[in-house]
Every structure is written in structure tokens, then in C-alpha cells.
Image: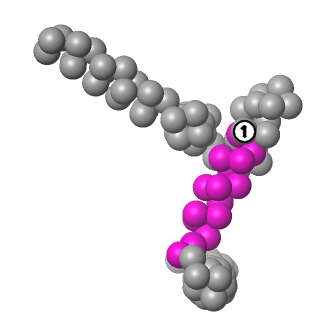
Amino acid sequence: MQPSHLALNGIARVCLANQHRREARTYRIIRDLGAAAGVHVRPHGIRHTAITQAIDAAAKQGLSIDVVRQFSRHRNISTLLIYRDELENKQAAIAELVSGCLSAADR
């Protein structure tokens, strides 16, 4: 490996270590603020809530789900469909329909 590659490799390791420390510090700050408020909270939960709210707001404004995909920085729209399904509670509705069909068949 050339000396310039070794230097870049070392810089990348330092950058990744610094990023990890920032993420850990952010996690602790958010966790501690939540604990002070009496709730269990973590950064991913905040992100999840923000994306779910963005999907809802975009739908009400007639905006494409691709706008939310760009906001969320997800690569694939199918990931956002999980959030949308949770918002609309489609899985629970389907489970209820199946349950109703099964109990009707038992009669």
C-alpha cells in the first residue's frame, strides 16, 4: 500500500471513531432528556415518529411519498410503506377481517 493510502486509511478511521462518539453522545443526551421527562425515548424513535408524521402530512397535502423518501433519506420507497402501513394500521385491519372470517366459519 502506498503511503498516501495509509494516511487516508488512518483519516477514515479517525473520522469513523469521531462519528461514533458523536452518535453515542447524542443518544445519551436524548435518553437523559427523555428520562427527565419520565419517558423512554431514543434517537431512532424520534426519527421514526418524524417520518410517520411526514407521511401523514404529505398525504394530507397531496404530496408524493417520494418527497418523504427524500426527507427521510431512505433509498427505497418500500421502507416507507412500512411506516405508512403502521400509520394506517392496515395490518391490524387485515387481521381483524381474517379473524371475522374464521369466527364466521366456526358458526
Q: Residues within 10 Å of mark 1 (few under 14, many from 20)?
A: some
Q: Residue furthest right?
A: 61
**Where residue 23 sits: x, y (%)?**
62, 79
Asked whether residue 9 is in view, the answer is: no
Residue at the image position 85 percent from the left and 31 percent from the top? 61
Q: Quadrant of residue 11?
A: bottom right
Q: Secondary structure at mark 1?
A: helix
**Where residue 79 sits: x, y (%)?**
55, 40
Amino acid, disc 1: Asp
Residue at the image position 70 percent from the left and 55 percent from the top? 50
Residue at the image position 36 percent from the left and 27 percent from the top? 96
Residue 42 inside the magenta-drawn segment: yes
Q: Residue furthest front?
A: 107
Q: Nearer the viewer, residue 26 or 39?
A: 39
Please give the range of residues in magenta: 40-55
Q: Nearer the viewer, residue 45 or 7?
A: 45
Asked whether residue 35 is in view, the answer is: yes
- SS majority, magenta: helix
Taking 28 as reference, is 53 above or below it?
Answer: above
**Quadrant location, the C terminus:** top left
Residue 15 inside the magenta-drawn segment: no
Q: Quadrant of residue 88?
A: top right
Q: Quadrant of residue 21?
A: bottom right
Find disc 1 in the rendering and name its residue: 56
